[in-house]
């Protein structure tokens, strides 16, 4: 089966990013890399089995609704990735082995197996580069002297490849160069809720630097926070409303300009 035509995106395919709200005069920018579940028309279903399309390997379940609720409360800007992370992971760098992984959490992705260098480059040029170039241009356009970048994610309660090791956290905050603010945010959540809050969990930015953080934060001194909400806790509108309200209060208390 031919998975990688050139050009990658056809006339029926949407652009690789979507602005839900674009307000450069406001302070907060939300990045929602894994909001989308689309695939380019030419790639079909990537050869994935049906069950995989209900798993975390194709996107961050629940995070689209949460991001859209939260941005209204913060009166900020929100950009979303449109295509499934199984096509190309926007929260990876081009040199990361799992940016278009042939195996994701134990599941083979036929469209990514034996991917030719030219086909890999085509995905980067069609999806990854425009998304991150758009973010860089917007940050340069932001008028606030101290913008805040909020990276929005959700995580699975248990990896399919490690079924006997469930993840115990309800929410995790990831950080790298902003230990004081991150520590204050973690402390805030622990004081105001009974949730089990992960400190650099479900993964550690010191051990695994993500693409969006590396591309948009490492060369700047802007305040930033990455949150991860467990996916089974944001399945209903009421749950999304609860978490958006909680995150809104925490961000406004801890990340004062």
Image (cartoon, rainbow, N blue to C red):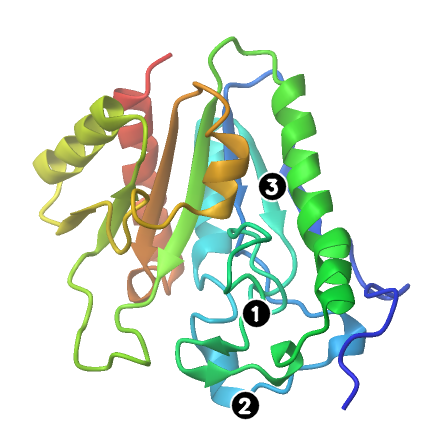
User: In the visual, does 195 lie left or right of 3?
Assistant: left
Give the Cα separation between the discs numbered 2 and 1.
Answer: 13 Å
Secondary-structure class at tag 1 = loop
Question: How many numbered badges does the structure rendering display?
Answer: 3
The residue drawn where x is 54% and y is 90% is: 49
Residue identifier under label 3? 79
Secondary-structure class at tag 3 = strand
Can you tell which mark lies on residue 105? none
Q: Quadrant of the C terminus?
A: top left
Q: Quadrant of the N terminus?
A: bottom right
Crowding at dot 3, Cα within 10 Å, few <14 / some 14-19 / many 20+, comes out as many
Image position, residue 26 (x, y; %): 55, 19
The residue drawn where x is 31% and y is 80% is: 161
Q: Please name which of the two marks, 2 or 3, marks the residue nearer to the observer.
A: 2
Q: Which residue is at the front of the view, 70 or 168?
A: 168
Question: Do callouts 2 and 1 mark residues in contact (Cβ within 8 Å)?
Answer: no
Image position, residue 200 (x, y; %): 24, 45
The residue drawn where x is 62% and y is 76% is: 112
Crowding at dot 1, Cα within 10 Å, few <14 / some 14-19 / many 20+, comes out as many
Q: Please name which of the two marks, 1 or 3, marks the residue nearer to the observer.
A: 1
Residue identifier under label 2? 49
Image position, residue 245 (x, y; %): 32, 39
Give the Cα separation between the discs numbered 1 and 3.
Answer: 19 Å
Q: Which residue is at the front of the view, 203 or 72?
A: 203
Image position, residue 64 (x, y; %): 51, 54
Can you tell which mark lies on residue 86? 1
Counting residues from the N terminus, which is met first, the one under dot 2 or under dot 3?
Answer: 2
Give the Cα separation between the discs numbered 2 and 3.
Answer: 29 Å
User: In the visual, does 156 lie left or right of 16?
Assistant: left
Q: Is residue 15 above or below residue 199?
A: below
């Amino acid at each position: 089966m031919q998975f990688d035509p050139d050009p990658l995106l056809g006339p029926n395919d949407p652009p690789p990013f979507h602005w839900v709200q674009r307000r450069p005069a406001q302070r907060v920018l939300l990045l929602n890399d894994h909001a989308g579940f689309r695939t380019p028309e030419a790639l079909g279903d990537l050869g994935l089995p049906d069950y995989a399309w209900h798993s975390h390997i194709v996107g961050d379940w629940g995070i689209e609704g949460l991001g859209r609720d939260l941005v209204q409360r913060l009166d900020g800007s929100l950009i979303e990735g449109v295509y499934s992370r199984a096509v190309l992971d926007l929260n990876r760098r081009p040199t990361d082995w799992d940016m278009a992984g042939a195996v994701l959490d134990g599941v083979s992705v036929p469209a990514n197996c034996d991917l030719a260098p030219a086909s890999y480059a085509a995905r980067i040029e069609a999806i990854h580069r425009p998304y991150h170039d758009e973010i860089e241009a917007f940050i340069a356009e932001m008028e606030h002297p101290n913008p805040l970048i909020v990276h929005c994610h959700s995580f699975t309660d248990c990896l399919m490849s490690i079924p006997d090791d469930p993840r115990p956290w309800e929410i995790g905050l990831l950080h790298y160069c902003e230990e004081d603010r991150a520590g204050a945010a973690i402390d805030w959540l622990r004081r105001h809720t009974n949730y089990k809050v992960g400190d650099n969990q479900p993964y550690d930015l010191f051990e695994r630097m993500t693409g969006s953080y590396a591309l948009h934060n490492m060369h700047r001194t802007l305040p930033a926070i990455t949150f991860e909400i467990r996916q089974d806790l944001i399945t209903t509108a009421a749950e999304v409303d609860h978490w958006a309200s909680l995150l809104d209060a925490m961000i406004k208390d801890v990340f004062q300009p």
